[in-house]
Image (cartoon, rainbow, N blue to C red):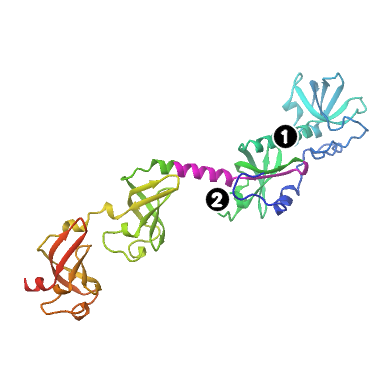
Amino acid sequence: MSDVGDPVAPGDSLAAESSTEPIAIGSVAAAEPTPIPAPGAPPKASNADPDSGRIVGGAVQSVDNDEVELTLDDGRTAVIHRRNFDAKGADPVAVVTIGDRLEGAVLSREDPKNRVVLSRAWAQKKHAWTEIEALANDKVVVQGAVTSSTKRGVVVDVRGLRGFVPSSHLELDETPNVSTYVGQTLDLRVLDVDASKERLVLSRRAILMKERRRATHDLLTSLVVGEERAGTVSSLVDYGAFVDLGGVNGLVHVSELAWGRVHRPGDVLSVGDEVRVKVLDVKVKRRRVSLSIRQLVPDPISQVVVDEIVSGPITRLADFGAFVDVGGIDGLVHLSELAEHRVFTPEEVVSPGEQVRVKVLSVDRKRRRIELSIRRAVSG
């Protein structure tokens, strides 16, 4: 099962990765440990026993370093040897005391002392698979301790079960060295669980994606139209620049980069630049933010004074005249104002980049238009 955008496909090599090394639930002991099968089948018993694999419980009557003896609910005497007590080889004396209740899976009807032989480790394992399946169905986050790494991901211990996290599900971006996760405890979401095959595949990326979506939503809802924010230029496109506001990218349209004409965003900005922006519009559901840089700096048109004579470069030529940069904003010198004599094309008297003196004839701040004259600046 999966609830993320990158489900594990059937037949994926991850199946082999997550099941090639079954979990060892016995521990080293003087006697040969009884083999512990997968939860889907009953344990192999030394004596024919219809109860093999059934989980039974009872009260502890005695305990020492080698075994735990208990009285089952049906009155029979049972024993759990240390090799079958715990998957990690724990000392029974350190775990249980007389009177405690224990459960175990039936391994054989009786031993030489006429006691039913149980495996607490196998019962714990079966319970763990049942719990994991329930948690997976409820999409509950589980914790896994990373025990080792492979070329394709990391092996984790989840409630005593061996699970696998593919490298593509460790982070939101590529993870070049998965061995750095060994020893860490990760919050994980179950992608796929099959107790009969002892297959458990998990994802950390699913949780990170959910956290990112929540953080993005929180940031979007916190943005206020008209406020000023700090950001970093994350990318440049033909129509503007994207600015990272701390998890959300907003667009500064090319028309909002500067008061003057901007042909290419790269002419005024570079990726990585720290900038101040004004929030123009926020659409939370579409996760779109419109920003402006130019509106946080004074409008140069407010500095232009009628009848003043100023200098500036020719920025471009048109059929009807030439545009001159006057303090950061373009003004138009009409053909009739280029020279004292009649001019048919601007190229006859000026060229782009040439510095000229002009006189301000008029300023229309609402329409953002400035009329200039070269001939009157000369004659004046």
The x and y percentages for residue 105 are 82, 31
Which of the two residues, 185 or 360, is positioned nearer the viewer here? 360
* Gap between marks 1 and 2 measured at Cα: 30 Å
Q: Is residue 173 visible?
A: yes
- Residue at coordinates 84% horizontally, 26% vertically from top-left? 79
Residue that label 2 marks: 172
| Residue positioned most to the bottom | 348
Say what amino acid the circle numbered 2 marks: Leu
Magenta region: 196-217
Q: Is residue 124 magenta?
A: no
State whether residue 213 is above or below residue 239: above
Quarter in which the N terminus is drawn = top right
**Mark number displayed over residue 138:** none
Q: What is the x, y in percent for residue 223? A: 37, 43
Q: Alpha-carbon neighbours of circle 1 within 10 Å: few (<14), some, or many (≥20)? A: some
Is 253 displayed left or right of 131 in the figure? left
Q: Is residue 367 above or below residue 141?
A: below
Read off the residue under disc 1.
130
Q: Main secondary structure of the magenta part?
A: helix
Task: Compare residues 112 and 119 and report the one nearer the observer.
Answer: 119
Secondary structure beneath label 1:
helix
